[in-house]
Structures are given as structure tokens and as C-alpha cells.
Image (spheres, helix red, strand yellow):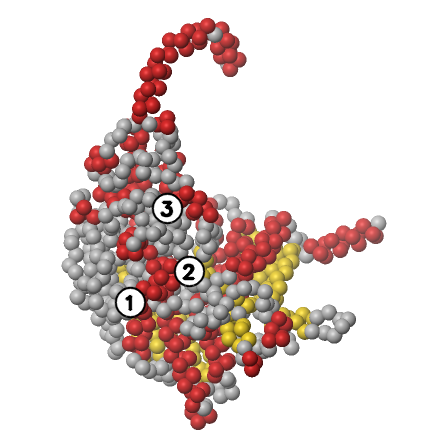
Amino acid sequence: MNCRAEVLEVSVEGRQIEEAMLAVLHTILLHRSTGKFHYKKEGTYSIGTVGTQDIDCDFIDFTYARVSSEELDRALRKAVGEFKDALRCSGSDGIGQISLEFYQKKKSRWPFSDECIPWEVWTIKVNVVNLANEQERQICREKVGEKLCEKIINIVEVMNRHEYLPKMPTQSEVDNVFDTGLKDVQPYLYKISYQITDSLGSSVTTTMRRLIKDTLAL
Amino acid sequence: MDTDLNSQDRKDLDKFIKFFALKTVQVIVQARLGEKICTRSSSSPTGSDWFNLAIKDIPEVTHEAKKALAGQLPAVGRSMCVEISLKTSEGDSMELEIWCLEMNEKCDKEIKVSYTVYNRLSLLLKSLLAITRVTPAYRLSRKQGHEYVILYRIYFGEVQLSGLGEGFQTVRVGTVGTPLGTITLSCAYRINLAFISTRQFERTPPIMGIIIDHFVDRPYPSSSPMHPCNYRTAGEDNGAAYPSVEDSQEVCTTSFSTSPPSQLSSSRLSYQPAALGVGSADMGYPVIFAGGLNAAHPHQLIVPGKEGGVPPVPSQPAHGTQADHERMVMCTPLDGALYSAATPSSSEDTETVSNSSGGKSGSPHDLLETIFVRKVGAFVNKPINQVTMASLDIPFAMFAPKNVELEDNDPMVNPPDSPDVESPLQGSLHSEGSSGSSSGNTHDDFVMVDFKPAFSKDDILPMDLGTFYREFQNPPQLSSLSIDIGAQSMAEDLDSLPEKLAVHEKNVREFDAFVETLQ
């Protein structure tokens, strides 16, 4: 099975990073979350209800709808917060990317650990810009808002292609497909990772590798 | 062919499409109400949430949608359309968007109705939730108020895009294949909005005393009336309206006082819609109050002037007899602010007026400051009435507190040396997100509604900051401020002055040395 990969790019000011990332990630997760499954006898199940709420951004002229789940929001905020801190520490012209990967677990026999097989990966490339004055910031607010509107439309377009989605699992398999740890909603299993590129265009890991190699070469 | 689809599947599919159409209309209209929507997730299925999504049903909207559908379903050549338009207070109107739910002939025979189609329709509704926040009309609808309102109209039949102007753009929300055809949901929206930019609206001078009462005659084959997106009548489903209103109260709002419901509603209605449009619409009531909706509606427009001040608007004829949802009534008095249903507690109106964001907060702010300054400067038990009378020439004077008891109960009273601190704080308390916050007084004239302090997180859970504000909003009077003690200490001070002077004269040399060190 091929993993579906989608890439989005945004240019934002430092203080807009969090909101822009949350807007995109929440929109994706809105489409990739269902209500909690309640399995009944005979292999049938019923599904809980997903609520939504509108969130206004403070630094961007933008509003997005997200799943009403504090736990999910907290998890995303934590990941985005770490990404933002890493991005801002990396240097003034930081470029980074944050990835949201949906995967399925495949149980392996002992002694092998379970495999995580991704089936959809969303990568958001972020370019942090520095602005000189308030007027530029105001323009940036509006521009980033418009850009995010475009990104939402892109996301929705991909979602509605109705391409591969994991089969609805039986009760024993549900934890291999869905994250059943939240109390009010059930997103597909996902993980968030990020990568920071410094201004030289190389990723931090390759720079570190080079440094170590150079040190050893001496 | 239909014979391929068994009767149960066919029935299910028809039901799915019907409820999908109704939910689509709800999502679109609710997204143009001008407020943030918030519904709660529930882990246990309630059985009444179609497509496993918590989408409220505004009864009037469902009624209109059912009326437009008239028992039919979207089919080839018969689309369900929701038209969103803008109407200014001068009567100009413009179509902003047309949302179309169409069906084409491309069938997907293999698809499972009860499972795959249902889930894909659910996904499509989620996409609709996302897309409705993204088109240009969303930001316009969030800023609707007394300068313009957003209206919706539902019709069934051929899609008419001519009203959108040149160069309109289309966004496809999504498609779902079914054995009977492919359902497509899309939006065509106007992009030529330049001449109605909201900035222009802010510069426009306020309209004086205009009531707009429209029956829109559209040259469309199925001419259906326009409905305000911020408007809920007490229609036939009056009874049904309230339960859903209460639901939204439970889910979205933070706190309410224990005021009787009618007072609560009208105090919400008196809220000037801020740019965020939060507040009264949580209750589902119009941000712009339609006066005299129908005779049965409990919340008539009470012109403030009737309380003794200068009547700012001519009295409105009751349009109540025509209870069909065809009106949008706006009332903008002379000084440009919107005075909606006012309760007898006029002091609350001061605050609600000061709620208005944007350019309007200037005058009520000044009024508040004026009152404070006068009270503070006087340092006497000057009746508030006197203050009010003296400041009648100030805008919003008629909303100055008249019946409020003095200082002890008035939470606006500050220590005399920091009036400036209070007013900006008050301003910030009524800033974005605050929806008709009141003094928090336990006095009967004050009704607390949905107090959202500035800089606090806007979420479902009760806010500590709001609780904190509320608890400490009524500090007891400082003892040094009370008149008797003040007078006494003044006399004592005067008596002790000669002694103090003598002491200081003795230390003259020290003082001189000190002064020299400063130079």
C-alpha cells in the first residue's frame, strides 16, 4: 500500500506559527476523527457524536472549525508548541516542517515489535519571516489569513477524493486503527513529528553529523 | 437502475439525502449568523445526531428548508440552493454566495448505502463546516451589525448564479457517489466585494432612525423570501426554539445569573454586536433585534426614550401580525449606536453600550469616565440623578444609571486616586468576546450575562479568570473614603499642622543638606 503524502507550504511571522499550524492540523483531524465506537454484540457498533467549535485566531485574520475535544487540542498544542520553540531557536531565517502522519498498527509475532504503517502523511513546510513594522504586520495578518483559506480548500479537496481509508476494525482491532485513548472523540492513529532546517538549508541533523565527522577527522 | 437497489437501501438513501440536505442548510446558515458556533462532542450516541455530527437544528431554518424542498429530493436538474446575500441599512442588497447541493447522473452501484455513503456524507458535512469559514462572506457575516445584515434564501430548482457579478469563483466542497447518482456540494461566491469593504461601512455616517421592513420580490421562478441570518422569530416552532436555545446555552456559554429568562433574553438582545458577533446569538436571538416580531413575541423593542430621556427613534409600528420570517428590522438612533430591547435596568445598558467595539466605544467610554470623574471629584453623596442630568448632553446619556444605588452597591466606584485605572479595565472587560457583561452586581437591575474577561481563554470550561473578576468586582468601600471619617481626619490634620511645622523647622538644616545632594 502506498502512503498518501500531501505537502502544504506557508510563510508566517513568528507569532503566527502556532495558530497557523493549529488551524491546519485541526482541520485535518476534523476530517480524520469520528465519534467513539461502542461495540455491541454481533459485530455491530454505534458511533458517538463529534461536536465542533469555531476558533478565532488572534494574530491572523482567520477562523477555523475544530473538533470539540480539549484533550485533542491539548495534544496538538503541545506538539505545535515544541515545533514553534525549535523553530524560533534555530535562527532568524528558520525553515521547518511539521508532519502529521496517520498510521495503522500491524501486530507482529514475538520478538518483533508492532509495525506502524503510515497511510497518509501531511507535511506543512513553514517559512518564518521577520517583519519590520506594524504596517507590514497588518498586511501579513490578512495575507496569511487568505493563504490559510487556500490551504483549507486544498485539504478539503484531498479529503473528498475518498481514497484509501483503513477498514473499519472489529473490536479487537480497533486500537490498531484508531486512537481510543480520548474520552470524547476517536481520531485515526496519528503521530506528529517535526524537522528544523537552519538558514544554510541543511537540516540540523546533517549539520550535527558533519560537525561530528569533522571533529573525528581531526 | 433502481432495481439494483433493494427497497431498504433505497429508503435509507432517500432518508440520508433528505437529512443531509437539511443539515447542509443548517451548517451554512449558522455559519452566517455572525457568531462562533460551538457544539459538544458526546461519546455516547444520542441517536438524534445525524451523520454523527453535533449540528444544531434551528427550527425556522429547518422549516424554510422543508418548505423549499416541498417533499422532493435533490435530483438531476433539481438542485437545492442556499443563497447568501448582504443587505445594507440603506436598502442595497447584493448576493454574496450560492451554495448548491446537486445530483448528477453518475452512479456508483457498488457502494454500500448504509455504511459508506453515510460516512462519506458525514465527511462532506465536516468539509462544509471547514469551507463555510473560509469564503469571503464569513468575515463579512462576523462583522454584520447595524450597517448591514446577512440574509439567506433557500430555493429548489435551477441554480442561478447571475446575481454574483462577474468573475465569481467556485469552490467544490466535495462529492459522494451513490447508486442513484453523485451528490455534489459546491459554493459559488462573489469576489468583487471592493465597494462594500467593511472599512467603507465604518466610515459611513450612521443612519438616523431608519427601519427597514422588507419583502423582497425576487424575479426568480421560485421566489422565496429572504431571511436574515441573524434573525430568529418566534415562529410556529416557538416551543421548539427554546429547547435548542437552552442546549446551546449549556454547551457554549460560561455563566449566567439566576435572572428570570425573559430578563436574560432582553439583556442579551441589548448587546451591541461586536466585530466578533459573540454573545446574544448564543441564545439564537437576533444580534439585531427585530422589533415587534409578532404579537406573541415577548421581547418588544422598548425605546429608551420612554424611560424619560430623549427618544432617539420614532416608535415602530408593530409588524407582529406578519409573523412570517420575512423581516429584518434595524433601528439606529441618532447617535448611531444600536439600542435594542432595553430592560428597565438602564445601568446595564451603559455597560452594554460600552460593549460595542470598533469606533463606537469612544462615547460610552467617555460617558463612563465622565460619571466617574464627577462622582470622584465631588466626594459627596451626590445623587446619581444629578450627575446624569448634568451629562445629558453627552451621547448615551439616557443610558446613564438612574436607579442604581450609590457607591456601596455600584461596582464601578473606584478609589478616588485611580479612576483611570477602572475605565480602561472596564473597557477591556467589555472588549472582544465580552457579550453584555454586566456589573456583576447582585442588585436586581443588573443582569449578568456571559462574562468573558479580556485575555482569558475562550473555551467551554468555566473560566477562573471570570470567576475571579466576578468575586472581586464588588470590593467594600475603603474606610478612608467614607465622608464622616474623612471630615474628622481633616479636622485632626488641621489641628496637628502647627506641631508638624514646628518639627520640620527644627530639621531645616537636614532638609537643606538633602536638597543640596540632589543638585
Nearest the eye: B268 or B77: B268
Disc 3 residue type (three-letter) = His
Nearest the eye: A112 or A127: A112
Q: Quadrant of residue B40?
A: bottom left
Give the foreground label among 1 and 3: 1
Q: Label 3 belongs to which residue?
A: B430
Q: Residue at x 56, y 68 (%)?
A: A187
Spatial CA span between label 2 and label 1? 20 Å
Q: Residue at x 41, y 68 (%)?
A: B55
Q: Chain of mark 1?
A: B
Q: How many marks?
A: 3
Disc 1 residue type (three-letter) = Gly
In the rendered image, is residue B284 in sight?
yes
| B202, above or below B223, in the image | above
Residue B337, image x, y percentages = 26, 49
Residue B339, image x, y percentages = 25, 51
Q: Label 2 belongs to which residue?
A: B251
* A152 sits to left or right of B208: right
Nearest the eye: B301 or B203: B301
Give the foreground label among 3 and 2: 2
Q: Residue at x 52, y 59 (%)?
A: A70
Q: Residues within 10 Å of mark 2 (few under 14, many from 20)?
A: some
* B67 sits to left or right of B320: right
Q: Label 1 belongs to which residue?
A: B239
